[in-house]
Image: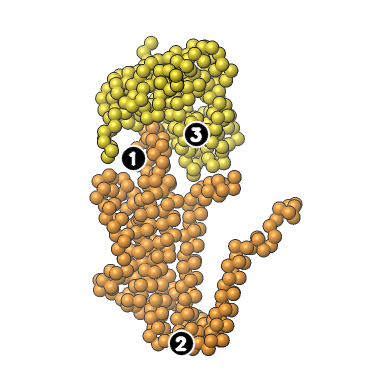
Chain colours: A yellow, B orange
Amino acid sequence: MDPLIDVQQVIMRYRTKGGPVHALADVTLQVGRGEFVSVVGPSGCGKSTLLKIIAGLLLPSAGQVRVDGVRVSGPHPGVGVVFQSPVLLAWRTILENILLQIEVRHLSKAQYRKRALDLIALVGIQGFEDKLPYQLSGGMQQRAAICRALIHDPPLLLMDEPFGALDALTRDRMDLELQRIWLESGKTVLFITHSIPEAILLSDTIVVMSARPGRVQELVQVTFPRPRDLKSLARPEAVEAIERIRAIMGTVPD
Amino acid sequence: MKEPADRLPWHEQWGDWLYPLGTIVFLVIAWELFVRLLKIPSYLVPRPYDVLLVLVDRHAEIFAHALVTAQEVALGYLLGVAVAVPCAILICWSRLLERSLMPLIVYTQTFPKSAIAPLFLIWFGYGILPKVVIAFLIGFFPMLIAMITGLRAVEPDAVDMIRSMSASKLQTFTKVRIPYSLPFFFSGAKVAATLSIVGALVGEFIGAEQGLGYLLIRANASLDTEFLFAILIPLVVLGRLFFSFVGLVERYVIGWHLAAREGAQGS
């Protein structure tokens, strides 16, 4: 079957006042339908840039990206993006924040209201739909942001270090919740993180990127069964995968 | 029923009012004593009680002139809002406008706007119009700068967020950037509220037949110090009312922001 995301020889260079930045060097990558793929790599390796290119928020200097067979030339309907911070609009209630996606895409809000409430229940923040964002904790705000990314039922969910700003306990819980949501929704997920254990917990495939200019160094398959939990990380194959990715990234002190 | 312990003691409940009020009462008494004991002539510093008498005695005259000044300030200020907001949006809309206008606007910040007030008198005569224009000009820049700062201060992720929804440029402005800029705008709008009163007064100082500034100049010419002091009181009231009015509008328009800020402080 053809992949949902097809990244072909993408190169990204910026010109800045400090001189040219070579963010991505020739990235080629496929993500299959329904797959959960994480991208890990050192800070500044261009993983967020790659995500923005796939979302159509940035245009690559060279190469091309297809999502669902269609060449990406700008933001497109088949995608929902979750950012590192929830970026909920402070003047809108949680429900209105989720329906922003519908409003901006000129879809019928009345029609998607029910779905919004279902998603709110799915991520476990029912009862908060009429609250303003500041009344929710960081973890709950990020759950609302996930609802906003899923409300128009896109086949692809792009997540840019979505739990990076949360405390460790909340983060663990959100990882498990995300796995459950992913198993229930059947979406394709591209997940940027710099936590190797998080990537192993969640992914089918882990893309390990090199330092800038970023390129794909290796693909690591994670095959052990789902649903996984935090104990799964103690399995020998998980430990081995962590070691291997660390070795590839060169972060293991000898 | 509330537990008595939950209630603040009366002097804490009204503390925000009582303590400054106490300061004012103290200062007035000190002033009265100071003038009496040192026998300072009233054309230099009048006694507070005499100022009050003049204020009561000539209240109709003062009120009529205060209305004129209030009108100049209100018109100039509203004109400032009406021009500053669209200008800020336009400047941030187009990269070309931003790059060509922004440095000049920042530069005009350091220019004393009241210096061109005499020119406006030549252009617009002695009526209310030149005062409105000066009040406008003095209030306009802080609002423009504040709004532009707000439009630029939007979180990059918030713009990416709405762009990822295939938003048009208009949508990114109406749904994200403009609401984001409003708290900034209002801080500028409050500064402008006090500044536009200065603007109107400066206009009246230079040449007028009406207004509190005109009264001040007249009182000054006749060394009527009691009257001079009496006119300061409606000016304080006018400034306070105007500032509070802008605060009320702020509370109505960006209540969400204030609630979130207080919520963050409370937790």
Between A191 and B230, the one lying in front of the other is A191
- On residue A165, which mark appears? 3
Task: Give the residue type that dot 2 points to.
Answer: Tyr
Give the residue type at disc 3. Ala
Mark earlier in primary sequence (2, 1)? 2
Which chain's residue wears label 2? B
Q: With respect to residue B186, does A89 lie above or below?
A: above
What residue is at 37 percent from the left and 62 percent from the top? B139
Q: Are marks 3 and 1 in contact (CB under 8 Å)?
A: no
Question: Quick one: label 3, few (<14), some, or many (20+) residues within 10 Å?
Answer: some
Question: How far separated are the C-alphas under marks 2 and 1?
Answer: 63 Å
Q: Secondary structure at mark 3?
A: loop
| Mark 2 or 1: the one toward you | 2
Local SS, label 1: helix
Q: Residues within 10 Å of mark 1 (few under 14, many from 20)?
A: few
What residue is rendered at 40% in x and 61% in y? Answer: B192
* Quarter containing the N terminus of chain A: top left
Amino acid under disc 1: Lys
